[in-house]
Image (tube, grey):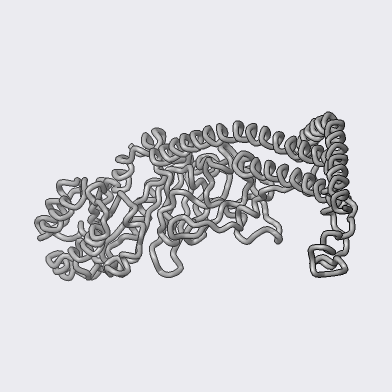
């Protein structure tokens, strides 16, 4: 009987509870919508405030992609590791994404904290269900707590719908604002990337074209590496706390770190075009870090390489050619720099002429004769592979017939002179054949064959009627058995001309002047002075 009464009572109680919950839901539904809308507006405001703080520079400390981060991040390019230069990148490259992600992180932290704080503020009720369903009679949970929020949520869920709606609205509002901000950033950054990439490609192409037209690449006088893109040193001394090597800018050209100017990590502003950088900054060799001549990067450079047998008279010829070149320009516009390799290698004699728009430099390489006739040592002189103008110095006194005539003259008529003993053909082939073996197209090069010691040659009977003209000099060499050598030279080089050095009456033509007149990269004012 009691069981029959309990069932209707339970059904009645259940009906009352359902009715009460339904009434509460009906009453609170409008308020839930209001709270949801308020939370949504709060989320929008929260995201806007964080965005304003980020882009207004009110965060301390701000999150930035510093030059140190870029410089210390080692990247891979092919099989080589390299660093970005120690300079600030354009905002759209890195910092735009950093700022957007910082806004996302801060908004996520606020929303997460709101959810966790609301959940932790709910009261805990005893674990009644554990007492009936679990074997633990005291209702202790796995975490050791005797109370739980499970019954709080089950019993008061209609009321909890209000804070839940506010949190949901807050989350949705934040997500909406971040989505709109992301779209705005993408709309601004992507066209900037596209335009920046197009501008970078155009400026780099124009810069490469300019450098190729005016032959601004230079040959390092220490390691003989052909420097097309020099390393430029920052003019400001970096503090000891800066990364090692941060004062070297190895890729100073238009790019992500600036299209017209670049700001070094130390704050110094510097140009990115080679023509401007060469006039203001110190250039270094990217291979051996040797300081290059002033104006490197914007100066036109013409390289001339001398070769021949030991004691053929190369050094004397270099001094005479340089003196003749300097005499054609005012002293204030012309400077000579000599660099001797401490390892006993070639001497580089640079003559710089200050033209109206850019310096014009002639760099003459004079290697020791014993090194030039050694094929292995000669292969280490990289400047030979990067030169278009060559001077082969030939000692006529080394020819057997002339050597006999020289020995027959009275001692008082012949001054003390060193005669080249090495074979003429071998001294020529040691350089030229090695160049062709290394893939150098010598047919694009020009060769001046210079017969040295013309003053001594005039003392001999065979040399007295010799004139300084190219045809006469070639005829003289053919008559003394060098026909095969001259034929090889005509076949190997695109243009060959013959000169006599040492004859003063009439004056001998200058082989350096002939080589320079054929260079189109020289400025007209310099070319006119060479005529």
Q: How far across and down, in percent of the image, does residue 413 sit?
A: 23, 65
- Residue that appears at 85% across and 47% down: 10
Q: Which of 147 and 56 is in front in this view?
A: 147
Q: How many marks?
A: 0
Q: Quadrant of the C terminus?
A: top left
Instruction: Residue 226: tell me if it is visible.
Output: yes
- Residue that appears at 40% across and 48% down: 362
Left or right relative to 506: residue 117: right
Q: Nearer the viewer, residue 287 or 517?
A: 287
Query: Residue 370's quadrant in the figure?
Result: bottom left
Q: Which of 487 and 218 is in front in this view?
A: 218
Q: Give the answer, above or below, for where 211 lies relative to 84.
A: above
Query: Residue 222's quadrant in the figure?
Result: bottom left
Left or right relative to 352: residue 46: right
- Residue that appears at 76% across and 45% down: 106
Left or right relative to 347: residue 451: left
Q: How far across and down, in percent of the image, does residue 81 sit?
A: 50, 60
Instruction: Residue 52: tell me if it is visible.
Output: no
Q: How far across and down, in percent of the image, does residue 270 sit?
A: 61, 43
Q: How far across and down, in percent of the image, does residue 366 sit?
A: 36, 59
Q: Give the answer, above or below, for where 113 lies relative to 225.
A: above
């Amino acid at each position: 009987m009691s069981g029959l009464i309990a069932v209707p009572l339970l059904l009645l109680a259940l009906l009352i509870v359902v009715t009460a919950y339904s009434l509460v839901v009906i009453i609170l539904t409008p308020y839930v919508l209001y709270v949801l809308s308020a939370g949504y507006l709060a989320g929008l405001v929260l995201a806007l405030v964080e965005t304003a703080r980020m882009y207004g520079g009110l965060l301390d400390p701000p999150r930035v992609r510093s030059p140190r981060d870029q410089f210390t991040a080692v990247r891979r390019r092919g099989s080589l590791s390299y660093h970005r230069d120690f300079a600030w990148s354009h905002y759209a490259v890195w910092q735009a994404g950093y700022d957007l992600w910082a806004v996302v992180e801060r908004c996520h932290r606020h929303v997460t904290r709101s959810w966790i704080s609301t959940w932790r503020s709910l009261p805990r009720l005893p674990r009644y269900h554990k007492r009936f369903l679990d074997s633990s009679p005291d209702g202790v949970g796995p975490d050791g707590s005797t109370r739980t929020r499970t019954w709080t949520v089950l019993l008061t869920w209609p009321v909890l719908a209000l804070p839940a709606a506010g949190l949901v609205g807050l989350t949705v509002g934040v997500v909406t604002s971040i989505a709109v901000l992301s779209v705005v950033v993408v709309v601004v950054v992507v066209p900037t990337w596209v335009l920046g990439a197009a501008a970078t490609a155009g400026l780099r192409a124009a810069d490469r074209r300019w450098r190729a037209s005016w032959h601004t690449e230079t040959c390092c006088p220490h390691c003989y590496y052909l420097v097309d893109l020099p390393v430029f040193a920052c003019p400001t001394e970096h503090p000891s706390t800066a990364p090692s090597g941060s004062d070297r800018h190895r890729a100073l050209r238009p790019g992500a770190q600036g299209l017209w100017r670049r700001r070094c990590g130390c704050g110094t502003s510097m140009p990115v075009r080679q023509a401007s950088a060469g006039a203001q900054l110190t250039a270094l060799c990217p291979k051996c870090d040797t300081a290059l001549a002033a104006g490197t990067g914007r100066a036109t450079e013409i390289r001339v390489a001398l070769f021949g047998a030991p004691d053929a008279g190369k050094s004397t010829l270099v001094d005479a050619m340089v003196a003749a070149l300097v005499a054609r320009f005012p002293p204030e516009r012309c400077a000579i720099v000599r660099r001797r390799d401490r390892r006993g290698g070639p001497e580089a004699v640079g003559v710089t002429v200050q033209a109206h728009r850019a310096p014009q430099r002639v760099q003459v390489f004079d290697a020791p004769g014993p090194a030039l006739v050694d094929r292995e040592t000669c292969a280490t002189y990289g400047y030979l592979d990067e030169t278009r103008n060559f001077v082969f110095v030939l000692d006529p006194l080394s020819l057997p017939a002339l050597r006999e005539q020289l020995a027959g003259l009275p001692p008082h008529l012949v001054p003390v002179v060193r005669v080249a003993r090495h074979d003429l053909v071998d001294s020529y082939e040691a350089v030229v054949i090695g160049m062709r073996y290394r893939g150098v197209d010598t047919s694009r090069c020009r060769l001046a064959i210079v017969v040295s010691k013309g003053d001594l040659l005039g003392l001999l009977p065979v040399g007295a009627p010799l004139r300084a003209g190219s045809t006469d000099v070639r005829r003289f060499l053919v008559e003394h058995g060098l026909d095969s050598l001259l034929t090889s030279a005509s076949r190997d080089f695109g243009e060959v001309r013959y000169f006599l050095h040492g004859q003063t009456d009439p004056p001998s033509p200058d082989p350096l002047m002939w080589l320079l007149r054929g260079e189109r990269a020289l400025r007209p004012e310099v070319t006119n002075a060479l005529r």
